[in-house]
Amino acid sequence: MLRADGVHGTLLKDDQTRKIPDRPVTTYVRAHHLDGTGDLRMPMKTHATCWTIAVMLLSVVPLNLAAAQLMPTCVENSPERRGELGCSIIENKLLPDGLKGPLFWHIDRFDSSERARTAVGPASVAFEAAGTSWLMTIESKTSDHHGGRHVAQVGPLQLPRAAKYSMQVMSAAFTPRMYSLAHHHSGVEAVYVIEGEACYETPTGALKLRKGETLALPAGTPMRAVVTGSRLRYVLAVIVYDAAQLPTMRMEEGTDPKLTACR
């Protein structure tokens, strides 16, 4: 199993540790590879067929059309839900009291949306993205796949101190050279790459992920998301945050620290 080094973004084995000097912001990252081929596309109904066509069309967009283009803000029912580019807020869900740590973000996939929805519990969300039905769960044990097939687990998650927690689930599809505004979160953000290549600029390094890899960044980490590579980038993400705060805060221009550029 591999994890990404938060200083240089290089991959380390689990039994290797890199000492990180004291600094105002500490970035914690884990990365995992899928077993086997890592191909997440599954035989689906019409939704999957439409998604396959959308990927083919978006993948041939000339790179110069997407050069230095700002990503739109994540919103509910964005164009991503209809096979276009965008970032969708799938659901904000208040998590139950008494969740016992250490906690993980557990991702399973299902062969139908009905089966995924049937498996939903107090700390999970079911939805469709990229032609696949997903179940995301915040839990301490990941051996139970809730009737689906295991995809990935991320953690243990470094949660902020809070009386209550919520989870915000998102899915986003963007083309190369698109980027987000600098921002930070009131809780840990975890990302899973379905397709393409993702990069996250932080004060301590540029963290690059490829298909099947995951990332976790602690609350308060300044960051900017950038699409690298040469094809469509599709990611799933969750923020587990203090329910008394907003999940995401934009950093005003001139107040954000220097971020290491993605190349």
Image (cartoon, helix red, strand yellow):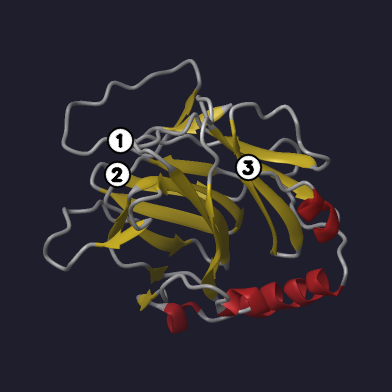
Q: Quadrant of residue 27?
A: top left
The earlier-in-sequence mark between 3 and 1 is: 1
Q: What residue would you read off at disc 1?
A: 7
**Residue 240's spot in the image, x, y percent?**
46, 45
The earlier-in-sequence mark between 3 and 2 is: 3
Q: Which residue is more in the foreground, 237 or 43?
A: 237
Residue at x 80%, y 69% (from the top left corner)? 48
Is residue 177 found left or right of 103 in the rendered image?
left
Q: Is residue 249 above or below residue 12?
A: below
Is residue 53 found left or right of 169 in the rendered image?
right
Front tag of 3 and 2: 3
Q: What residue would you read off at disc 3?
A: 137
The amino acid at mark 1 is Val
Q: What residue would you read off at disc 2?
A: 205
**Residue 243's spot in the image, x, y percent?**
40, 49
The amino acid at mark 3 is Thr
Q: Quadrant of the N terminus?
A: top right
The amino acid at mark 2 is Gly
Q: Which residue is more in the foreground, 68 or 27?
A: 27
**Residue 127's spot in the image, x, y percent?**
69, 60
Residue 33, can we see it?
no
The earlier-in-sequence mark between 2 and 1 is: 1
Residue at x 35%, y 58% (from the top left corner)? 246
Q: Residues within 10 Å of mark 1 (few under 14, many from 20)?
A: many
Is residue 252 found left or right of 242 in the rendered image?
left
Q: Which residue is more in the foreground, 3 or 99?
A: 99
Q: What distance separates the C-alpha of mark 3 from that of mark 2?
A: 29 Å
